[in-house]
Image: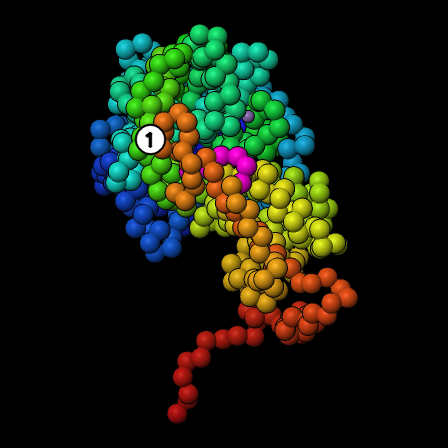
Amino acid sequence: MAKDMRTFIDQVVRDRPGEILVVDEEVDPKFGITGIASKLASQNRFPAVLCRKVRGSRLPVIINLTASYERLALALGTTMASMVPDYANRPSAKIPPKIVERSKAAVKEIILKGNEARMSVLPVPTHNEFDAGPYITGDTLICKDPDSGALNVGMYRIQVQKEQQLGVWMWDTHHGAHIRRKYEELGREMEVAIAIGHHPAYVMAAVSTLPGIGGELEEAGALLGEPLEVVPAETVDLPVPARAEIVIEGKIPPGERAFEGPFAEWPGTYVAEGDKPFINVTAITMRRDAIYYDVFSSNREHTVLGSLPRMGVIYRTIKQYVPGVKNVNIPSHGRMYCYISIKKETEMDVKRAAMAALNVEPFNLKTVVVVDDDIDVFNDAEVLWAIGTRCYMERDLTLLPRLAGPGGLNPVGYEFHPDGTKTPVMISALIVDATKPAPPIPYPPRARVPQEVLDRIDLDKMLKEFKGFER
Ligand code: MN
């Protein structure tokens, strides 16, 4: 069977038992669903939560399905330690999508058009206290470049403004915004299709920063390891994923704006409210028993899901300049940090690796830490230890003020966007060189028990619980 959100849920149940929890009592889509996930987060727990009964809709909601790197690694058929190099290497083999018959497309089981295509059918959650209202956060928006015909897919924040109107914010440098500006110049409506609920590999492909416009559907195939099944939309000239849970179709009128926001973004703060383009909804199609997929915006799920594709692209880019790159982590507590481990061959490697990362993600990363290849970048304590023991603070910190490129969403970004939205466009960044000095400068070996002794110890065999002294 082709992969989709349901096959992934089955896989999590099988391979990571206990990581999907169910709520049977009715919950309010306004803060109720995120409230549960938020309380779990305060206990440092990030299981997926399936809310079976959501007030006002007959559809269940799943939140946090993609809130852990362990589950994203599982979705790619790999482990956390090797998911980044795996991600970086796999999409070199692009796999184009496959068109399937309409009668075989699960997403066409229910088709609502015209006046029937109303947003109140869907249980769209309101996530945080000062959000302007319900936001679709687990979406992938498909559109077509009017010049090349290339299909582009991206994930954007989408506000439910009216029964048939959705506010959409695409940041200036995103391909979706580039395409939208072209339609606006042509004075033409821009057709869009928004898919909600699919295999995480497809969702991550939509987030990937790819060279040029389009290619996400092919990257999805590469990450899935099989072609993505697509089917034509009902009211717009676009293909949509046949195995999605829900698809919303619509058109963005040129030159028109509606007030969008505020909305809590991944740094954990509200940002960028203002006049934005909007979508007029023309159709909603879905599975008969559709599950609404929600990403907990501004919380760990937002950071984690948004970060693995970025880590993969950063790794791929660093590799061009520093062949000794070993691993990259954007730690789950914030997309503004990046840890890079390298086998340092020359002193230049450190800055070249850090600059490559900042070039990929100038508006997300603020602190880039480069460590040696004996440091586990997925262990914060090891990275902090490296900063503490391998960094000459007076010469190994490099501050980059007024970093070229947009400041984006960070609350300490500065200089606001000329479009009048409260969006900072500048940011400053820090490179921390926490690598050992290169030989011949001496550096003591790291303290550890000899490896051959560790290899001989089988903890499960040797250790038993102490039951107290026998008297
Ligand atoms: Mn793109």
Q: Is residue 127 above or below residue 442?
A: above
Residue at the (54%, 28%) spot, across then down: 2
Element carrying mark 1: loop
- Where ligand 1 lies, by quadrant? top right
Asked if one can make out residue 99 in the rendered structure from this viewpoint, the answer is no
Query: Left of 267 or right of it: where is 146?
Result: right
Badge 1 crowding class, 10 Å Cα cut-off, few under 14, some 14 to 19, many 20 or more, is: some
Characterize the magenta stretch by its predominant secondary structure. loop
Residue at the (44%, 18%) spot, across then down: 193
Q: Give amino acid for label 1.
A: Glu
Name the residue that disc number 1 marks.
273
Residue at the (42%, 36%) spot, across then down: 415
Q: Quadrant of residue 23?
A: top left
Q: Quadrant of residue 162?
A: top left
Which is more toward the observer, 125 or 53? 125
Query: Left of 118 or right of it: where is 395?
Result: right
Q: Is residue 442 above or below residue 435?
A: below
Residue 431 is situated, as x and y percent measured from the top left of the image, at: 57, 51
First to last magenta residue range: 403-409
Query: Left of 377 or right of it: where is 427?
Result: left
Residue 463 is situated, as x and y percent measured from the top left of the image, at: 52, 74
As drawn, the residue found furthest toward the right would be 440
